[in-house]
Image (cartoon, grey):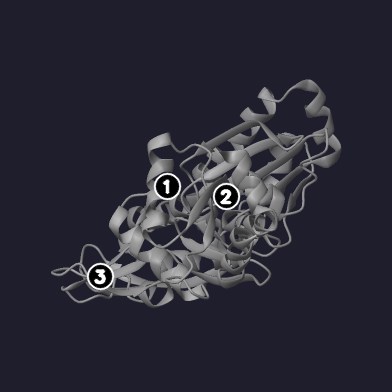
Amino acid sequence: MNKRKSLDVFGFLSNDIGIDLGTANTLVFVKDQGVVLQEPSVVAIYENSKKVRAVGAEAKRMLGRTPGNISAIRPMKDGVIADFEITEAMLRYFITKVSKNPKLVPPRVVIAVPSGITEVERRAVKESAIHAGAREVLLLQEPMAAAIGVGLPIDEPTSNMIVDIGGGTTEVAIISLNGVVYTKSIRVGGDEMDAAIMNYMKRAYNLLIGERTTEEVKMKIGSAVPLDEEQTMDVRGRDSVAGLPKTLTITSEEIREALSETLQSIVDMVRSALERCPPELSADLVDRGIVLAGGGSLIHGFDMLLTQATGLPVFVADDALRAVANGTGVVLQDLSLWLSEAK
């Protein structure tokens, strides 16, 4: 009786949280509250002492603008931890920010991770979360979290296909009867698109542009198929030859050309998944189609490009950016059950 009462108090004092630990952004879902935090996965540290100067949005504003004694770092690369200490500091900051009593009663945490990470990488994520203040940690495959988050009927004996395009990775999964029938992860995503735009600007115009400018270009005039009315945008950067500030006007056609190879690699992965899908489940996809999630799915016309390549209907999820975080939120409702099944 006493044990049960203490467990109830434990649950009352803590708040279980779900984390979409992304390469570009981290989203935190608090049980019964929804997504309460969405900040860039960036940490600014002092070079000499390695102490944290800022985390999240404040740190991102410092990217490319820090004095010599401060570095703005992205501790996640290709969906996995590249810098353990900095990731731990970032997780601690986010957990503390959303938790009721993190020191008195550490929260239980669900973290979405790429399906392609190794066992060593999985352990590293768990250990970082525990050191950052989590009481228990459940790792959930990102495509499964995304499928749950967009409301796909994953428990039915029919085929559901999800493509989650994040900052560092793109995941494709075919799910049926609460299980993943096929999954593949490639380390291509929004960051690769940004790199393609940066390289194009340097190659075509000798113009060096920063991360924030690149992301703005991608979001404003990036597209996967020709637009009804092509657009232009003024881009500021530094001339790599003269070394002076420079402004250029670029077109959406140019950015589409820059993005084409990266987007094609995602299309090829989806086609490969369809070729490996069992015939019975393939038939279901003719009606159900493919659902897109993640920030990369918001590139204008990517759903149309994928329809042209596969012949299947393709839908962008209503809340594509938060699909994975929302999926962790659904899992939080039955977290004890998920934790017991994982053991």
The answer to which quarter of the image holds residue 283 is top right
Q: Residue 78 carries which label?
A: 1
Asked if residue 306 can be seen in this view, the reply is yes
243 relative to 150 in the view: left or right = left
Mark 2 or 3: in front is 3
Mark 3 lies on residue: 45
Q: Disc 2 versus disc 3: distance between alpha carbons?
A: 29 Å
User: Which of 82 and 119 lies nearest the eye of the viewer?
Assistant: 119
Which percent across, then down, holds residue 302? 65, 50
Q: In this view, does 189 lie above or below 216?
A: above
Which percent across, then down, holds residue 47? 17, 68
Mark 3 or 1: in front is 3
Mark 2 lies on residue: 165
Q: Disc 3 versus disc 1: distance between alpha carbons?
A: 21 Å
Q: Is mark 2 on a helix, strand or loop?
A: strand
The answer to which quarter of the image holds residue 310 is top right
Asked if residue 80 can be seen in this view, the reply is no
Q: Mark 1 belongs to which amino acid?
A: Asp
Which percent across, then down, holds residue 172? 62, 39
Between discs 2 and 1, the one toward the N terminus? 1
Q: Quadrant of the N terminus?
A: bottom right
Q: Is mark 3 on a helix, strand or loop?
A: strand
Q: Residue 282 carries which label?
A: none
Q: Mark 3 belongs to which amino acid?
A: Ile
Q: Is mark 1 on a helix, strand or loop?
A: loop
User: Which of 306 and 155 lies nearest the eye of the viewer?
Assistant: 155
Between discs 3 and 1, the one toward the N terminus? 3
Instruction: Tally the numbered discs.
Output: 3
